[in-house]
Amino acid sequence: MILPGDNESVLRQKWRKHKRLIILIVAVTLLAGGAYLLVLTLSPKFSYVPSSIDLNTDDDVNDMRDRIQISKINLEVPYFAGGAEELNKGAWWRYPERGDPEKGGNFILSAHRFELGLTPEGTKARSPFYTLNKLEPGDEIRVFYQGKWYDYIVTKNYSVPRTAIEIEAPSDSAKLTLYTCSLKGEIDGRVVVEAQPK
């Protein structure tokens, strides 16, 4: 015979068991989610994470997209004129009227430094300029523009506040300007790389 108090005691014991299981499931889920977020955050740093932005010179003859290649940082990414939405497809060609590889002037490309994706590959693809700060004077950059390759040599790598609009100023001499946000975000400033035609 089960007394009313005994039934309550059995329910409490069952609840304690379920409570421990629920806490364990939540803890494991949070731990796994945190580990995955860490992998997503670190994925642009590592070359073992495949991506559509990895350097691929094998298809140079058949690939007619306007794009930039930087072998030092294992980067090949297309660039597009238009609005800020182009940042989601690769690099954004800022102010095409101010310069291009053929006519000279200030050829300006901007891309995301770090954007989370749903997968490590997605994060890497959304963060093409993650390692832009590693470029040094003397490093080589190739740009494919309207069916022809143009070679550049890095001359400067520096940081500016986000209000430094002079990096996009028109130029009488031919140059390539690449820029992206600091890893702390746009408010912290920008990393800028300048290069001259080879």
Image (cartoon, rainbow, N blue to C red):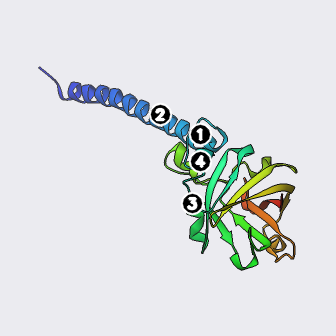
Q: Measure the C-alpha gap from mark 4 to mark 2.
A: 28 Å
Could one spot residue 188 in this view of the protein? no
Q: Secondary structure at mark 3?
A: loop
Q: Are marks 3 and 4 in contact (CB under 8 Å)?
A: no
Mark nearer the viewer, 2 or 3? 3
x, y percent for residue 173: 87, 72
Circle nearer the N terminus (4, 2): 2
Residue at screen point 87% across, 49% down:
138
- Looking at the picture, which amino acid does disc 3 mark? Met
Look at the picture and state if 149 lies above or below 5.
Answer: below
- Looking at the picture, which amino acid does disc 4 mark? Lys
Circle nearer the N terminus (2, 3): 2
Which quadrant holds residue 2?
Answer: top left
Mark nearer the viewer, 4 or 2? 4
Q: Which residue is mark 1?
A: 38
Q: Secondary structure at mark 2?
A: helix
x, y percent for residue 53: 59, 50
Q: Which residue is mark 3?
A: 64
Q: Which residue is mark 4?
A: 124
Which of 13/173 is in front? Answer: 173
Residue at screen point 76% across, 77% down:
98
Quadrant where the C terminus lies? Answer: bottom right
Q: Which residue is mark 2?
A: 27
Q: Residues within 10 Å of mark 2 (few under 14, many from 20)?
A: few
Q: Measure the C-alpha gap from mark 3 to mark 1.
A: 36 Å
Q: Secondary structure at mark 1?
A: helix
Circle nearer the N terminus (3, 1): 1
